[in-house]
Image (cartoon, grey):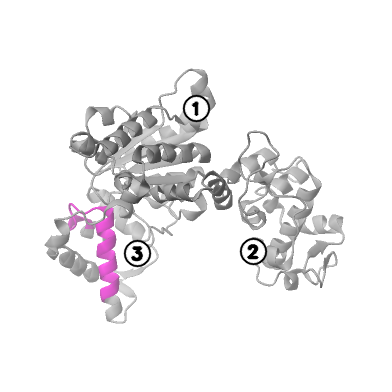
Amino acid sequence: MSDAALEVVEFLLTARLYNDNRALDENDLPPRYRQVFWPDGSTDGDRPGDDSPVGIERPIRPTIETTRRATGVENPWSAISELMFTDRDEFSGSLELTQPDMAEEWFLGRAEERVLHNPVLAYAFEGEVDGADHEAARDANRPVQADRAWIDGLLSEYFADEEEEEMLDLVDIRAPEEIETTLDDLVLTADQEAEIQKIVKAIEHREYLAHIGLREIGKLLFVGPPGTGKTSTARALAYDLDLPFVEVKLSMITSQYLGETAKNVEKVFEVAKRLSPCILFMDEFDFVAKTRASDEHAAIKRAVNTLLKSIDNISLIQDDVLLIGATNHPDQLDAAAWRRFDEIVNFPKPDEGMRSDILKLITRPMKISEFDPMALAKETEGLTGSDLRMVLREAVLDALTEERTELTQEDFVDAIKDFEERDHLKDMDMIEGDHDALVAGGDISGSGDASADGGHSHDH
């Protein structure tokens, strides 16, 4: 039997069991299923004090269209039409299981392993299928609060007024499903890995930390030159932890059309608290020190003071918000900025071993003859991960002009020479702000899409 039939039957079984078991909620539906059934963003007025988006209403109805979207099977009825326990309503396009018991027996006889990863099925067949554990399957599922549809519903309610909608220009909010970089796609130093592991443990044990009174934790400052992976690491952390990613560039608070800057800073933190648990990433943190030391307009200085107070008043333990600041210019930060963070994570330019690992990682999808990444690493001293990606891009494009998709070592050597000759690029911040590039990844487009299966760490 085809994988397409298994996909469709799993969806139909999940829908039936979800409809019949009121003990289950949206977090029991696999994310790819529940995204099909989210209502347009409005909030649940029936729950006092609850302004989270309305949940998925029962019954959920498998139709040709919803089944196609949930499973990726282009012709779902064709995939199951020969099965004795399925039927289709010609008028409504709905699909159904005419003999659910037979459907369950058929499915379990062919795909028991799917039960382990589907919380609805794990709930139904716990004790019947070896290894089926409802809580484990549910915990492994991305939480509903990380769904794009849930985020959009909350934002549309919270920023209903036109004036408040401008506030969203301050922030870039990404659901984990929209981040295509994982921590395994990056080459990290031992120190970076250790700090990330610490914060992961802090998130896992928030209740314990609150119980012992350790609340001043969960505010990280990433420091290092442009292109060393500060933004990419923060985003990858959001992906791996299934947390919404709220990014704000602090220089944006000077934008004229945004109105009252101090109020907007407060709103940024309100957004983060509403979306919690989440990561709040504040780029260009040196802007704080620059403003405090300059003769900037009083309104901007008030905004910076509001920012510092807001940082003091937000907590991973109490608010479920992990705050990460980033700066390319740590030398410009003053004591007031430094003391807001409990951990400083250094993002240096990669050493020779890291550059070799980066080159191995970003060239994985490619065919290269006589490839010697260590030799290239020796020739690229001082280059960052994003610089190496630009070298790779140059080598690929040069090869394509010769109608070649297989690269040679010489292509890379020539690309390195071309890169070094562009002194005007070396004398400026090549990758600014949002383009703080991957230290390593599998995509050569510069989009931040990393398709590599894993990364390497290199101890200094």
The residue range painted magenta reads: 377-398
Amino acid tagged 1: Gln
Q: Are marks 3 and 2 in contact (CB under 8 Å)?
A: no
For the N terminus, give its image quadrant: bottom right
In what element is the residue under mark 1?
helix
Residue 49 rendering spot, x and y as whole percentages? 63, 33
Image position of 230 (left or right of 134) = left
Residue 35, given in percent of the width and then of the height, sits at 62, 55
Left or right of residue 318, residue 116 in this image? right
- Residue at the disc numbered 3: 444
- For disc 1, the marked residue is 318
**Which residue of the protein is positioned furthest toward the top in this rendering?**
212
**Observer-nearest residue: 378 or 43?**
43
**Circles 2 and 1: CB atoms closer than 8 Å:** no
Q: Nearer the viewer, residue 309 or 117?
A: 309
Closer to the observer: label 2 or label 1? 1
User: Mark 3 belongs to which amino acid?
Assistant: Ile
Q: Which mark is residue 417?
A: none
